[in-house]
Image (tube, rainbow, N blue to C red):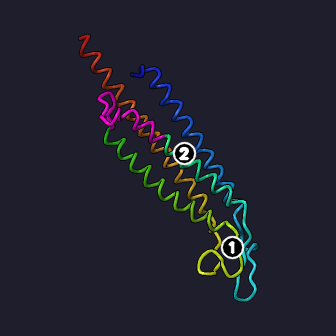
């Protein structure tokens, strides 16, 4: 069984990694917003359109990977502390507020992923007659990547908040047990 100090170090280290990955994902989204295709990049020859690939495609994929890793790491820390070998760990209890934050993190994660996947796939090259959808070219609207950035911050903030609330609730419960035994 892990000692409390080792467990706290693991949690803090994982939170720092998750937060770092989220910030990198945010920076990549901002760079994607700047590098996305503009209206001037669209070529039209009467009935057909062509849109070259933009750097936002690669930046968007990197943002997706970083966001996914941040979400996975944050949730692994939370559930590793909560579950032990398939059985509920009595030392860690997830509070109602932590559960709500976890739900918010998954909802914002899902919406951010949908926005990023769609915007990133639109940033790929759209050749004549093929386009992005039904032979038509589509541009990523201004602010889509910026909106994803806000959702990424909500996602990671909710996960980290859930982890910290779980740790704080458990620390308070352990302090009560220690005071009850000594008093």
Between the C-alphas of marks 2 and 1, the distance is 29 Å
182 sits to left or right of 103: left
Judge whether 178 appears above or below 158 on screen: above
Judge whether 138 appears above or below 83 on screen: below
134 sits to left or right of 124: left
Based on the picture, tell me whether residue 86 belongs to the magenta stretch.
Answer: yes
Q: Which numbered marker is on residue 126?
A: 1
Residue 103 in the image: x percent, y percent? 38, 50
The residue closer to the viewer here, 112 or 58, is 58
Judge whether 37 appears above or below 68 on screen: below
- For marks 2 and 1, the one nearer the N-term is 2
The residue closer to the viewer here, 112 or 47, is 47
In the picture, residue 168 is in which quadrant? top left
The residue closer to the viewer here, 53 or 99, is 53
Q: Residue at x 49, y 28 (%)?
A: 10
Q: Which residue is mark 2?
A: 69
């Amino acid at each position: 069984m892990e000692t409390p100090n080792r467990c706290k170090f693991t949690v803090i280290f994982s939170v720092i990694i998750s937060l770092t990955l989220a910030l990198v994902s945010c920076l990549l989204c901002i760079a994607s917003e700047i590098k996305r295709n503009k209206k001037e990049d669209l070529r039209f020859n009467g009935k057909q359109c062509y849109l070259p690939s933009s750097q936002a495609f690669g930046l968007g994929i990197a943002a997706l990977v970083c966001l996914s890793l941040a979400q996975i790491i944050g949730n692994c820390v939370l559930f590793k502390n909560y579950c032990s070998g398939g059985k509920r760990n009595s030392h860690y209890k997830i509070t109602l507020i932590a559960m709500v934050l976890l739900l918010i993190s998954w909802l914002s994660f899902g919406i951010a992923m949908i926005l990023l996947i769609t915007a990133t796939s639109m940033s790929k090259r759209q050749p004549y007659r093929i386009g992005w959808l039904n032979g038509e070219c589509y541009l990523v609207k201004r602010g889509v990547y910026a909106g994803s950035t806000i959702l990424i911050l909500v996602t990671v903030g909710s996960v980290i908040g859930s982890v910290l609330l779980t740790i704080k609730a458990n620390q308070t419960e352990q302090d009560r047990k220690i005071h009850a035994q000594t008093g």
